[in-house]
Amino acid sequence: MKAGTSSSTPAHNSLPPPTSSSSARAARIASHSHIKGLGLTPEGVAAGDAAGFIGQNNAREVRAVLLACGVVVDLIKMRKFSGRALLLAGAPGTGKTALALAISQELGSKVPFCPIVGSEVYSTEVKKTEVLSETFRRAIGLRIKETKEVYEGEVTELTPAEAENPLSGYGKTVSHVIVGLKTVRGTKQLRLDPSIYEAIMKEKIVVGDVVYIEQQTGAVKRVGRSDAYASSYDLEAETYVPLPKGDVHKRKQLVQDVTLGDLDAANARPQGGQDIMSVMGSLVRSGRTEVTEKLRREVDRVVKGYVDQGVAEVVPGVVFIDEVHMLDIECFTYLNALLESPMAPTVVLATNRGRASVRGADDLRSPHGVPSDLLDRCLIVKTDTYNREQIAKVLQLRANVEGLKLGPGVLDRLSAEGEKASLRYALQLLTPASIAAQLAGRSQIEIEDVGEMNELFLDAKTSARMIGEDGGYDGGRAY
Ligand SMILES: Nc1ncnc2c1ncn2[C@@H]1O[C@H](COP(=O)(O)OP(=O)(O)OP(=O)(O)O)[C@@H](O)[C@H]1O
Ligand SMILES: [Mg+2]
């Protein structure tokens, strides 16, 4: 059956064909895609839901959680929280993962944020402590300032010069490329290597763009389109930049952001050619080259040298370990050590366990399944289950993000379901309900759609009740 075609008699469950733009957009909606930040103002918690995180002023608990996270964000930005840990603890579906993502959004793209899930550390190939320490190294940023000799200006000419290929009789090759660059002060014509021409083609540079070319490496960077070519459109993807000042050939300060993890990996890889065959070859031959502790120490030493000279600046980032109770006692001990190392990032942990046994030490029961020596190093923030009003707000937000229209009373009904079952269940009903509405030929979700889906799909609590105490569908018989 061809569902979704526009035949005259559609099957009962066929959907109207999605328009290409809306399906492309729907594909990008993940369960947290409405979270854009914490929504804090200098005075406290924003009343609206501008940043996608619901925390209205009247709910004291949510407000406290948001303020706590706001304080942590400020401390991280001031680089005063590294080597410490924040633990988000609370029941499932109370927004712990959402909070951590909101924190990362607040920090911006310049502060490294490395999320992992507790169970990710278990691998048959890599030691679990290795996974942890790699994640920690990826969360330490390094801002390197370099002064480089560059040619900068607006491209006035771009002419590749071709020559007969001396090796084979076929075709021609680019022997060099003539690039004209213009600044406020003057113009210059450069004769460049064919490899730079490739870089120019890759960056899609055309006459009228402002570019710079590094003298030593030949790396080409497009800054934007020159002002002189600015059009009169109100909205457009292009960035316009003024004609560069000074000479074409100058010394320029460039800022590069890398992480310690990048440096480790770059130094562990066997140095070969840059072409694709040698990269593939090294993958096949040696598999993953290990980053040894010795190499890390070497990288640290070089980095420390840079920092002392003022060339580089350390930017401690954030490691987020979701479902932290999945770690075992060895990992927890290692975490303690990592937290105390001189270059440690901020650590955010999340768990939905109450009192649970610590993995790997089953006789040890501890709050949140985290040993007490690690708990002692944490600031703990408890997230609470949402009330009806808050559930309604989250639902409305999700409906907006997914582009769904809600009919009268639907929000009430859904939030009642959410209160009875869970916020997640209510959120999960939204999409199927919208499909039911579409099938009935409506563009808006009505109460009956929600009711229908509520009958079709069980929530966790109902399902658990149906299984019953004896734990089977068949009168408790064990299968
Ligand atoms: N305050 C909020 N504002 C907006 N959306 C929220 C809020 N709290 C939770 N959500 C949304 O509700 C859903 C469930 O929250 P989330 O996944 O963060 O729960 P959790 O605490 O991590 O649960 P678990 O313990 O099961 O991992 C997500 O889609 C999340 O984006
Ligand atoms: Mg979660």
Image (cartoon, helix red, strand yellow):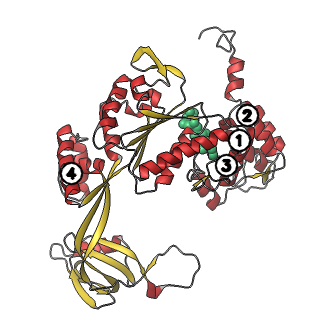
What residue would you read off at disc 2?
419
Residue 39: image x %, image y %?
Answer: 59, 53
Mark 3–mark 2 contact, CB under 8 Å? no
Along the polypeptide, which appears first: circle 3 or circle 2?
Answer: 3
Q: Residue at x 43, y 57 (%)?
A: 109
CA separation in Å, label 2 and label 4? 53 Å
User: Pointer 1 and pointer 4: residues touching (CB < 8 Å)?
Assistant: no
CA–CA distance in space, label 1 to label 4: 49 Å
**Disc 4 to disc 3, how far (Cα)?**
46 Å
Which structural element holds mark 4? helix
Locate the N terminus and report the quarter of the image it occupies.
Answer: top right
Residue in the foreground of this view, choosing between 348 and 70: 70
Q: Would residue 107 appear left or right of 314 to someone viewing this image? A: right
| Labelled pair 2, 1 in contact (Cβ < 8 Å) | yes
Foreground: 473 or 326?
A: 326
The numbered mark, 3 or 1, whose residue comes first in the sequence reads 1
| Residue identifier under label 3 | 398
Queried on whether the Cβ of the residue with tag 3 lies below 8 angstroms from ligand 1, the answer reads yes
Residue behind mark 4: 304
In the rendered image, which residue does mark 1 sit on? 391
Pick whichever, 302 or 134, lies toward us. Answer: 302
Callout 2 crowding tier (Cα within 10 Å): few <14, some 14–19, many ≥20: many
Identify which amino acid the numbered label 3 is placed on: Arg
Q: Quadrant of ligand 1?
A: top right
Instruction: Tell me whether circle 2 and circle 4 mark residues in contact (CB < 8 Å).
Output: no
Rendered residue at 50%/47% (across/down): 71
Tell me which corner region of the image, top left, top right, bottom left or bottom right, holds residue 359: top left
SS label for mark 2: helix
Query: Residue 221: image x %, image y %?
Result: 33, 72
Q: Secondary structure at mark 3?
A: helix
